[in-house]
Amino acid sequence: MSIENFTAYNPTRLHFGVGIINKLGKSVSKYGNKVLLIYGKGSVKKYGYYNQVVSQLESSGMSVVEYSGIKPNPVIEDVNKAVELAQKEQVDVIVALGGGSVIDTAKVVSLAAGSAIDGWQIVKGNEKPGHAISLICVLTLAATGTEMNAAAVMQNHETGEKLGFVNSLSFPKESFLDPAFTLSVPKNYTAYGIVDLIAHALEAYFGEGEPSLTDRITFEIIKDAMEWGPQLLNDLNNIQLRANIMLDATLALNGLTQYGKKGGDWGVHAIGHELSLLYDLPHGATLSIAYIAWLKIQQDRIPDRIKKLGASLFGETSVDEIIDRLSSFFSKTDSPVSLSEVGIGEDQKQKIIDQMNSNLVSGMYHKLNDEDRKKLVELML
Ligand code: NZQ
Ligand code: ZN
């Protein structure tokens, strides 16, 4: 047992509930008159969320310019184009309508356009922005927690990197979470969202520091998702279940699970990012594959920590059994637990090892070396 010093800060105003979008226009108008609306590849138009958002903005007297087409696992090129538009149109405020990819893009745009600094230099941490254009989020997919945190993740295929960064200027000013906006999320992405939120809780749990209360809170978030997640996957139109998972996802990565800790580990996310970069796999799918392999690597190094988790989640203290139970849970949600399940075979082994070695994939707390990375890839296949 030890006491870790920590600082807690979260300024995002969160609006949660059915019909909450009716407060959007009034809220956004506090930040200016000219809006840059950022969204993805079309689901928001297909399901009517776009119309609701635009009518809120226009009826509150705002003019709207748009940047759309953000892809899952977003790329820096879109940031650069949206920054140009934001600067040319001199927008006062950015509204992001979508999931993690759209919101993360909007976060980098708000920093880069607000500070006149190149977006990738911000992602790399080479330059520190001093100002951000105010960002308001309307979330359409429960998964990442980006709606209430200061992190963003971006891909750059030129440099061969998918990188996350945290900057306190990136907290959204306000976020609107209507579970009805997630009713249309297809089954596979609903499952990946459940895996992602559980992975966030696990990354926090396996980070540095073992505060008793925070461990318990973290277990409860995972248990809630494990109870409601499978039910939701059999009943995608159930708004109550959508709301349960939406709240789980936000609380798994808004700072709550970091109280009393130096920080999370994030080694599994680092592995997952390399897989997304190479094969454009959905983020959550990379995590169900990587977590099982990572736990097998760690099982002799941190058995007590794994046993404490297993005792709470499954009433089980055999490390092998705990890893099996988690793997079965992921499989039950139809999320992959091996690369072969997503069509990636032995012939890709060296390529993945080289990619992981070139970016020195590791955790913040549980460090991984070349030998670990090789074993991880073998375990993932
Ligand atoms: O592009 P559209 O047409 O909108 O379709 C999207 C996309 O194809 C679709 N979708 C979203 N909302 C929908 C919907 N389809 C129907 N109905 C809706 N309501 O879902 C697909 C996936 O969207 P995406 O935004 O990529 O998913 P997610 O929210 O899982 O975000 C993943 C990204 O977030 C990063 C990941 O690395 C990945 O790049 N992360 C960000 C974090 C953060 N900022 O804190 C933490 C996470 O660990 C994660 O790394
Ligand atoms: Zn994640």
Image (spheres, grey):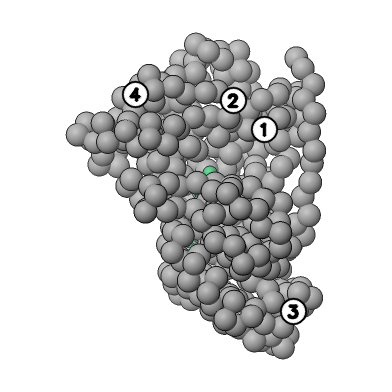
What residue does disc 4 label? 374
Count residues near mark 1 (Cα–Cα under 10 Å), then give few for <14, some for 14-19, many for 20+. Answer: many
Q: Secondary structure at mark 2?
A: loop
Q: Which mark is residue 263?
A: 1
The reply to whether callout 2 and callout 4 are in contact (CB within 8 Å) is no
Decide which of tag 3 and tag 1 comes sooner along the chain: 3
What residue does disc 3 label? 32
> Residues under labels 2 and 3: Cα distance?
42 Å
Eyeballing the image, is 356 above or below 249?
A: above
> Measured from the top left, where is residue 305 in percent x and y?
61, 18
> Measured from the top left, where is residue 94 in percent x and y?
64, 71
Query: Quick check: can you spot residue 329?
Result: no
Count residues near mark 4 (Cα–Cα under 10 Å), then give few for <14, some for 14-19, many for 20+. Answer: some
Q: Secondary structure at mark 4?
A: helix
Residue, x 49% and y 15% (percent of image)?
Answer: 299
Residue type at mark 3: give it. Gly
What residue does disc 2 label? 365
> Residues under labels 4 and 1: Cα distance?
26 Å
Decide which of tag 4 and tag 1 comes sooner along the chain: 1
Decide which of tag 2 and tag 3 comes sooner along the chain: 3
Quarter the C terminus occupies: top left
Quarter the N terminus occupies: top right
State the residue in front, 44 or 61.
61
Residue type at mark 2: give it. Tyr
Q: How many marks?
A: 4
